[in-house]
Image (cartoon, rainbow, N blue to C red):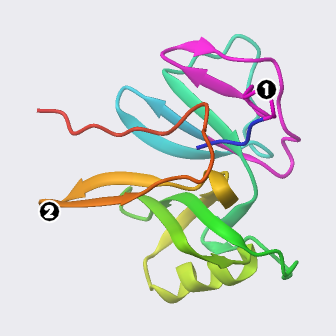
């Protein structure tokens, strides 16, 4: 899910099972926070709503950049850097999307434009760690979808349907 260092420690703010992992945090002006509390997923703009001292989360993952922010394009120019991509998004109805492009390389700018072209009314889409750590495993409508990451990853975002 999130960026990590060679020693597999998180590069940004990370909370799993209510416990903070690591001490690092990215620049709040350019990053967002995926928050899972009481089973609800949200994406928080840390420029507007910074993490407060002592604030508690069930789970949280800091990443960057926003591909869509407040319904508007978030990436202003194309760096031309190509990679496999992963993102998480929320639309105006509160539907959460896990978006993975594991089979080809694409720039963040092009990825953003492809997301906008879907006509899904995204409020926020936050880029997650991509490149060789991009992967997905899911069962969707009875079909197994699996695209392994090319390298080991220290942490993932996992969703489980409650019964």
Which residue position holds label 1?
7
The crowding category of the residue bearing disc 2, from other C-alpha atoms within 10 Å (few below 14, some 14 to 19, many at least 20), is few
In the drawing, does residue 37 fall left or right of residue 4?
left
Viewer-nearest of discs 1 and 2: 1
Is 54 within the magenta?
A: no
> In the image, residue 103 lies at what x, y percent?
52, 74
> In the image, residue 130 lies at what x, y percent?
66, 57
* Residue at 50% over, 44% down: 42
Q: How many angstroms separate mark 1 from mark 2 (CA)?
A: 37 Å
Please state the extent of the stretch shown in magenta in the rendering: 5-33
Above or below: residue 55 compared with residue 38: above
Quarter of the image holding residue 6? Answer: top right
**N-term-proximal mark, 1 vs 2:** 1
Which residue position holds label 2?
141
Can residue 68 be seen in this snapshot? no
In the drawing, does residue 43 fall left or right of residue 140?
right
Is 12 within the magenta?
A: yes
Q: Are marks 1 and 2 in contact (CB under 8 Å)?
A: no
Q: Nearer the viewer, residue 138 or 118?
A: 138
> In the image, residue 66 lies at what x, y percent?
70, 61
């Amino acid at each position: 899910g999130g960026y990590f260092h060679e020693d597999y420690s998180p590069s940004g703010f990370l909370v799993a099972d209510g416990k903070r992992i690591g001490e690092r945090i990215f620049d709040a002006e350019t990053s967002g926070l995926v928050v899972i509390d009481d089973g609800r997923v949200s994406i928080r703009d840390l420029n507007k709503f910074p993490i407060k001292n002592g604030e508690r989360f069930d789970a949280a993952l800091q990443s960057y950049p926003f591909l869509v922010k407040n319904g508007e394009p978030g990436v202003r120019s194309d760096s031309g850097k190509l990679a496999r991509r992963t993102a998480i998004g929320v639309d105006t109805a509160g539907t959460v999307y896990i978006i993975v492009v594991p089979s080809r390389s694409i720039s963040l700018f092009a990825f953003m434009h492809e997301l906008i072209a879907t006509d899904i009314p995204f409020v926020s889409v936050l880029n997650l760690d991509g490149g060789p750590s991009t992967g997905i495993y899911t069962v969707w409508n009875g079909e197994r979808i699996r695209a392994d990451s090319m390298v080991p990853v220290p942490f993932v975002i996992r969703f489980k349907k409650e019964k």
